[in-house]
Amino acid sequence: MATHQLIIFVLIVTLCLVVPTILLVLCIVFRFRAEGIHRQHRQTSSGGTTESAAESGTGTGLDEFTIQSYTKIVIGENRRLVPACKNESSCPICLAEYLAGEIAKCMPECQHCFHLDCVDKWLKINTTCPVCRKSLLFSKLHNDNLVPNL
């Protein structure tokens, strides 16, 4: 009877140690595999071996005519945007402060403003404002393309 109990004890201990160890190893393997897949995706989407959607023109963003129709503002010496813009001192996309003479672009519906290059790249692959995510698909076109900031 003692050997039978010893065998059962050894089986229980083995199961308690081996099964969690196998599960842990499997979790680690899958984690590294997933990390490798994400790393590969980041490399290809950031200009590694394939073009990004913005560069290839295959994005789902706005068309070039609509992007160019949005109001542009020349940043004045005080480096602040006109009062109509919600963010006044820095671009929410790149987080850099506006400098005098730079050109910013304002979204027609929500009046959020961004560096011209930053928002143009965004709009080529997105149809929303980068800050409030308001849809820009049906926004009205602006005729005043360049407004100097006083």
Image (cartoon, helix red, strand yellow):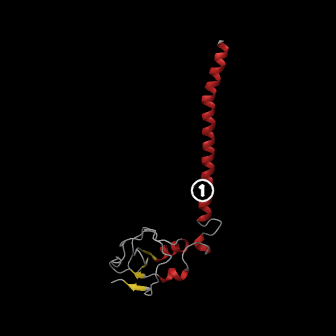
Residue at coordinates 60% horizontally, 34% vertically from top-left? 20
Where residue 106 sits, quadrant-wise, is bottom left
Vertical arrangement, residue 48 with respect to residue 73, above or below = above
User: Which quadrant does the C terminus fall into?
Assistant: bottom left
Hey, which residue is sitting farthest top in the picture? 1
Location of residue 115 by image quarter: bottom left
In percent of width and height, residue 92 lies at 42, 68
89 over 25 or under it: above or below: below
> What is the x, y in percent for residue 110?
40, 74
Residue 68 seen by the camera: yes
According to the image, label 1 marks what residue?
Answer: 38
> 134 or 65: which is nearer to us?
134
- 116 relative to 47, above or below: below
Residue 37, position as x, y percentages in the image: 63, 55
The answer, for residue 93, to whether it is visible in the render is no
Residue furthest to the front in view is 138
Q: Which image quarter is the N terminus in?
A: top right
Q: Amino acid at mark 1?
A: His
Q: Secondary structure at mark 1?
A: helix
Lateral position of residue 121 relative to residue 50, left or right: left
Q: Residue at x 63, y 69 (%)?
A: 51
Along the line of sight, the residue nearer the viewer: 147 or 128: 128
When asked about the image quadrant of residue 86, the answer is bottom left
- Residue 113: x and y in percent read 41, 75
Disc 1: CA contacts within 10 A as few (<14), some (14-19) or many (>=20): few
